[in-house]
Amino acid sequence: MVKQATLFETFGGIRPMAEALGESPSSIQGWKNTGRVPATKQPLVLMRAAELGLDVTTDDVVFPLGRPAVACDRAAETKEPHA
C-alpha cells in the first residue's frame, strides 16, 4: 500500500505552502496541527494548487492529513428498537 502525501507534503512543506498562499508559516503550521484548512482559505488553496500544477482535490483540502478511518457497526444499525 502506497502512503498518500498530505496536503502539506504536496505543497513541499510548511514554508513553501505558506509562501505559495501568502500566509505566515505559523498559520500553515496551525492548520497542520488542527488537521483542517479554514473554510475561508479552501478556495485559495485549490486555486494556488491548480496554478502550480499540483495534484490537489477538494477532498485533499477538506482532509489535509488524509481521510480519517471510519468504523461502522452494521450490527448496531439492524437491531430492533426496544419496546
Image (cartoon, helix red, strand yellow):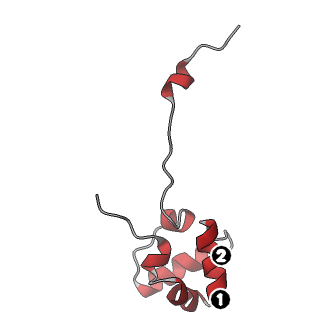
**Residue 15 vs residue 81, the one in the foreground:** 15
Identity of the residue drawn at 48% across and 49% down: 69
The label on residue 40 is none
Quadrant location of the C terminus in the rendered image = top right
Q: Secondary structure at mark 2?
A: helix
At which x and y percent is residue 32? 58, 72
Residue 7 horizontal side relative to residue 83, left or right: left
Q: Amino acid at mark 1?
A: Ser
Q: Distance of mark 2 from mark 1, alpha carbons?
A: 10 Å
**Drawn side of residue 12 relative to residue 44, left or right:** left
Local packing at callout 1 (Cα closer than 10 Å; few below 14, some 14-19, many 20+) is some
Residue at coordinates 66% horizontally, 81% vertically from top-left? 27
Going 62% across and 73% down the picture, which residue do you hit?
A: 31
In the displayed structure, 48 sits above or below 36; it is below
**Horizontal and vertical percent for residue 60?**
49, 66
Residue, disc 2: 30
Q: Quadrant of the N terminus?
A: bottom left
On the image, the x and y values in percent for residue 44 come to 59, 79
SS under mark 1: loop
In the image shown, does 33 or 60 lie closer to the viewer?
33
N-terminal label among 2 and 1: 1
Residue lying at the far top of the rendered structure: 83
Q: Which residue is mark 1?
A: 24
Q: Is residue 50 above or below residue 36?
A: below
Q: Residue furthest right?
A: 83
Residue 57 locus on image (x, y percent)? 46, 68
Q: Quadrant of residue 50?
A: bottom left
Q: Identify which amino acid the numbered label 2 is placed on.
A: Gly
Q: Quadrant of residue 61?
A: bottom right
Answer with the quarter of the image where residue 2 lies.
bottom left
* Vertical placement of residue 51 versus 65, above or below: below
Rendered residue at 60%/13% (across/down):
80
